Amino acid sequence: MLTEAKVREALSRVKDRDLNKSISETGGIREIKINDDKVRVKIALSRMGSGSQLEVQQEVVNVIKGEGASSVGLRFDQLTEEEIEAAGGFPKPKFEGPALLDPDSPTTFIAVTSGKGGVGKSTVSVNLATSLVRLGKRVGIIDADIYGFSVPDMMGIEERPQVKADRIYPVERFGVKVISMGFFVENNAPVIWRGPMLGKMINQFFADVEWGELDYLILDLPPGTGDVALDIHTMLPHSKEILVSTPHATAAFVAARAGAMAIKTHHEIIGVVENMSYYESQKTGEKEYVFGRGGGERLAEELKCDLLGQIPLGQPEIDEKDFAPSIYEEESRIGSIYMEIAKKVIGKTVK
């Protein structure tokens, strides 16, 4: 005998396609009426007038007839917004790209760039990365300066990434996960590639590298506004940006162009780092402004952002046993400046 309980149990096997839940769970079974072997039902769905409604319509008829009904009368109703929310809301569409580039990824991207080469952009990148690790953050760095890769050498990295099951595992040094074009060329050979090939390589750094969970991914960009820098700016769903310049007026002027690119691609400039700000005599403590003064301040003012720090000229202490020619010790004077810059970066990027 056909009963309401049997019809309701049959309908509980039918899913609202857009909520991915049964119409029983969503409260979508509005009405069931039985007259002998004829059944009339009213079903509420989250979306009306769609292809999924037609699928549900056919399935409802089939499952009820499967219980012995000779005919099925079906009407549809619309779930309320409150009912949709109570059922968990509409699932977010699956992001098809690399998980790291998912708009909902918890990783904060920090692109470090400059208008021209030779201002210490990579030095700032590696020391910012290591300083963030010292502050307890999980950090990776992509050496995206494809033609002028230098991060492995600066950090004293001699080994290469491991490849397991078609996934690339970055090299870890000072707690920082590192990937670089330098790992994929032999004997410091020059990279002679055109733009499209470079773009594919950069995409692989996001898609094929097993980064794990990261709080920050530092991108050491090539100087200027060329193909690679533009590709990365358009590839990232969201990114912060740090501009590196020397105090020299021309270096700051050229760096402003890189800042303009960041603004046009809707990335947030969080600050300027002025490198080679001065030389301080170890004997007298007197400061000499070898490259002039004021460039970083003027650049920060033009870009309407903060001057995160001014780093003097100075060589890190070299440890032959743990060689890393560009990493400053945390307790050193310049290392402490980088620590203060890292704290400011965290303060500006906390989600």
Image (cartoon, grey):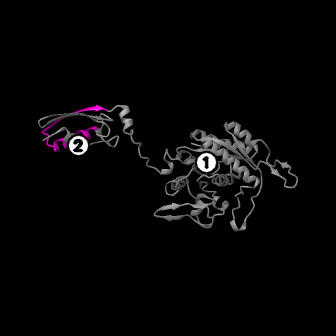
- Type of amino acid under label 1: Ala
Nearest the viewer among 123 and 222 is: 123
Whole-percent x and y of residue 270? 64, 42
Is residue 269 placed above or below 197 in the rendered structure? above
Q: Residue at x 67, y 38 (%)?
A: 305
Q: Residues within 10 Å of mark 2 (few under 14, many from 20)?
A: some
Whole-percent x and y of residue 311? 74, 49
Q: Quadrant of residue 65?
A: top left
Instruction: Indicate the quadrant containing the C terminus: top left, top right, bottom left or bottom right.
Output: top right
Residue 56: in magenta span = yes
Q: Which residue is mark 1?
A: 111
- Please indicate whether residue 135 sits to the left or right of residue 36 in the image: right
Secondary-structure class at tag 2: helix
Q: Residue at x 67, y 54 (%)?
A: 127
Q: Is residue 261 visible?
A: no
Nearest the viewer among 26 and 152 is: 26
- Type of amino acid under label 2: Glu
Is residue 187 placed above or below 30 in the rendered structure? below
Q: Which residues are magenta?
A: 53-78
Numbered badge on residue 9: 2
